[in-house]
Amino acid sequence: MLTIGQLAAYAGVTVRAVRHYHQVGLLPEPERDASGYRRYGATAAVSLIRIRILASAGVPLSQIGRLLDADPPTFADAVRQIDRQLRDEIARLEASRQQIAQLAAGDRLALPPEVVTYLDRLRAIGASERIVEGERDGWILMAARWPDHTREWMPSKIAQLDNPQAVRLYRILSGIFDDDVADDAADAARLEERRPDRDLAEQAYASGQIDLGEVAQDDLPFDLLDALAVEADPRLQRLLDLMRERGWAGLARLERLAEPRAERPGRAKPSGQAERPGRAAGPGQNARPGEPPQVRRSAGG
């Protein structure tokens, strides 16, 4: 007769495991002897060894009990089912390992490979890491909302980086927003000095557009993208104000503002009202930190 410690050592488990198997009903708990100790026989040792083998093979404890008493056909069928479950679990764990491996390269976390290629191109043309990080976060929002469309947009976005005007715009903005100047007045002055360079955005608007069709009717992602940009760098609010002075609204989705025109005597259309028929965008998604891809609505948008 074996004590609980001797039984555990013989079967290759811990005393705690034996007690747990008692609690869940896998291993019958023997009566205590006159000295108050539990004594286990050979049958208990065989049962415990079988439990340990099944548990080590990955069989859930909840299924071990029925396997211990199953006839050969039932046992074989149950093993096949457990094997399928284990294969599914292995596939899930392999996917988790791949995601963990991607943590070493933050761009690849939550982004499709096409976007990662685009971000690498941004670095290659001289965009600062701060600009690239803003682009990355903006594309994370886009890919979460429209994963399939995001892949479709990337060839056009990458092609836009062959435009020298787009390259110049990214480099200018990198210089502005990488300089952490605490003086708001100085920031505003520097943006004013760059006013001629904002013509590049207008030229890019005309040359690099992505037509999203019905997707562009979904305003929430674009609102989040604009908010992301301003949160990343509050100076972008000043840039938004300057753009509005030149007849533009928005960052993620550039929008041409309508010219004021009198409709009837004593009434005039307010200046700064956005034109609704078309929304368009410039060369680069997130040309500013946290700024999203710029797109335009279809003619019916």
Image (cartoon, helix red, strand yellow):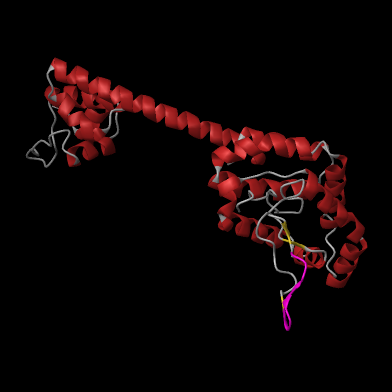
Does residue 132 sit above or below 99 in this rendering? below
Figure check: 225 above or below 106: below
Residue 181 placement (x, y as % from top left):
85, 64
Main SS of the magenta part reads: loop
**Looking at the image, residue 84 lies above or below residue 29:** above
Residue 236's spot in the image, x, y percent?
A: 76, 62
Q: Is 206 situated left or right of 83 in this image?
A: right
Furthest residue toward front: 264
Furthest-bottom residue in this view: 266
Residue located 69% across and 64% down the image = 274
In the picture, measured across the screen, residue 160 lies left or right of residue 139, that is right
Query: Relative to the observer, which residue lies in front, 70 or 136?
Result: 136
- Residues 64 and 170: in front is 170
Res 108 seen here: no
- Which quadrant holds residue 247? bottom right
Please indicate, yes or no, whether residue 161 appears anywhere in the rendered image.
yes
- For the N terminus, the image quarter is top left
Quarter-wise, where is residue 24 in the image? top left
**Is residue 2 part of the magenta span, yes or no?**
no
The residue lying at 8 percent from left, 38 percent from top is: 31
In the rendered view, would you say 136 is above or below 193? above
The residue drawn where x is 58% and y is 57% is 219
Where residue 165 appears, as percent x and y from the top left, is 87, 44
**Bounds of the magenta span?**
258-267
Tag count in the figure?
A: 0
Closer to the camera in the image, 70 or 194: 194
| The image quarter in which residue 79 lies | top left
Where residue 204 appears, as percent x and y from the top left, is 81, 47
